[in-house]
Amino acid sequence: MIDMKTATKGFIPVMLTPFTETGAIDFDALTRLTEFYLEAGAAGMFANCLSSEMFELSESERLQLIRHVIKVVNGAVPVVATGTFGGPIEQQADFVKQVHDTGTDAVILITGLLADETDSEAVFNEHVFQLLDRTESIPVGFYECPVPYKRLISPENLKLFVDTGRVIYHKDTCLDIHQIEEKLRLASRPGFGLYDAYMAHAVASLKAGSAGLSCIQGNYFPELIVWLCQHYDDTDQQEKVARVQQFLIDKMDVMHHVYPITSKYFLQQRGLDLSTFTRREVGTFTPEIARQIDGLLADYTRLQEELA
C-alpha cells in the first residue's frame, strides 16, 4: 500500500475526462491532461470521479479510463478511482475488485451509493463493513459525492472505518471546518489522509492537519492548488497565502457554473488541446459564461505574476 499521507501536503486532482466532438473518450487528450496534472506537481490522481463524468461512462469505459491513467502515470504518483456504482453489496464488491485489478492504490467508495438517503447511520455502517468483508485486503477510500445524494460520514464513523487499517483516502465535502477538525482529531492513523474539497477554508483545513486538497479548482489551475499546499504555513508567505485563499473564495461561483464545460474551456484557453464536449447535462455554455471564464483566466494570470 502506498502511503497517501506524506510529510508534505498534496493536491489530488479530481480528473476530467476529455471526449472527442462525437462523444468518445479521447485517450490522446487524456494522456496530455494527465501529464499536465503531473507537471503541475500533483501528488496523486483521482480517476473515474464525478468530474470524470463517471455516471455517464459504461463499466468498460470506466476500467479503460483508469488503466490509461495508471499507464501514463507509470508509478510517479498514487492513483485512486471510484469502484461503487450502486446495486447489491455483492455486485459493488465485484466491481471494487475489478477496479483494484487495474493497479489502483485505493478504490473509492461513494457514500451515497452504500445506503439509501432514508437509511440510518447504522445501516450505512453495516453496508460499509459488508463491503470491506467482501473485498479482502483491498485499500479503499471514501468520497462524499453529491450524486445521487450527499451522505456525510460523521467523525465517529470515519474513525471506525479508518481503524480497520483499510482506509487510506477520504475526499471530504462537509464544507464545515469544525467537522474537518473533529475528523482529523479522531481518524488519525499512519497511511490515512483526508483531502478537502472545499476551497473556502483551504488554508484552515491544511493547518488543521488535512493531507491535502482535492478540488475542482485544480481543473482550472492545478499549479495554484499545489502552491497553496506547499506554502500555506510559510511564515514569510502569509500575505500571498491570504491573497490566494481570497481569490479561491471570490472565484468559487464562476468555476462551478456549467462545470465541467467551463474548466475544459479554461484549459483550452491555457493551450491544452482538448474538446469542451461533455456527456453530463450541466446547462448551456453561453457567450456570457465564456466571457466570465476569460475574465477568470486574466485574473489568475495576474495572481500568478504576483506569486512569482
Image (cartoon, rainbow, N blue to C red):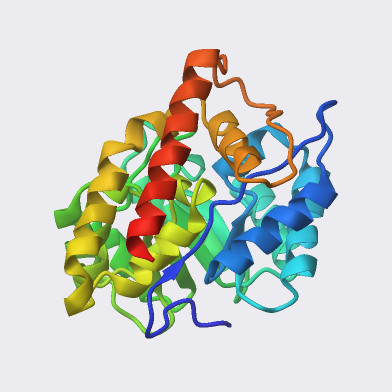
Quadrant position of residue 120: top left
Q: Is residue 167 left or right of residue 270?
A: left
Q: Depth check: 221 or 21 in front?
A: 221
Q: Is residue 87 left or right of residue 223?
A: right
Picture coordinates of residue 18, whole percent (x, y): 73, 41
Image quadrant in which the N terminus is located: bottom right
Q: Depth check: 80 or 113 in front?
A: 80
Image quadrant in which the C terminus is located: bottom left
The residue shown at (44%, 25%) is 292
The residue shown at (43%, 31%) is 295
Picture coordinates of residue 71, whole percent (x, y): 80, 68
Q: Depth check: 271 or 107 in front?
A: 271
Residue 134 appears anywhere in the view? no
Q: Tell me: residue 236, above or below residue 16.
A: below
Q: How many marks?
A: 0
Furthest toward the left, the residue is: 178
Picture coordinates of residue 301, whole percent (x, y): 44, 48
Q: Is residue 21 left or right of residue 150?
A: right
Q: Tell me: residue 305, above or below residue 159.
A: above
The residue shown at (75%, 51%) is 30
The residue shown at (75%, 44%) is 273
Picture coordinates of residue 148, whole percent (x, y): 49, 31
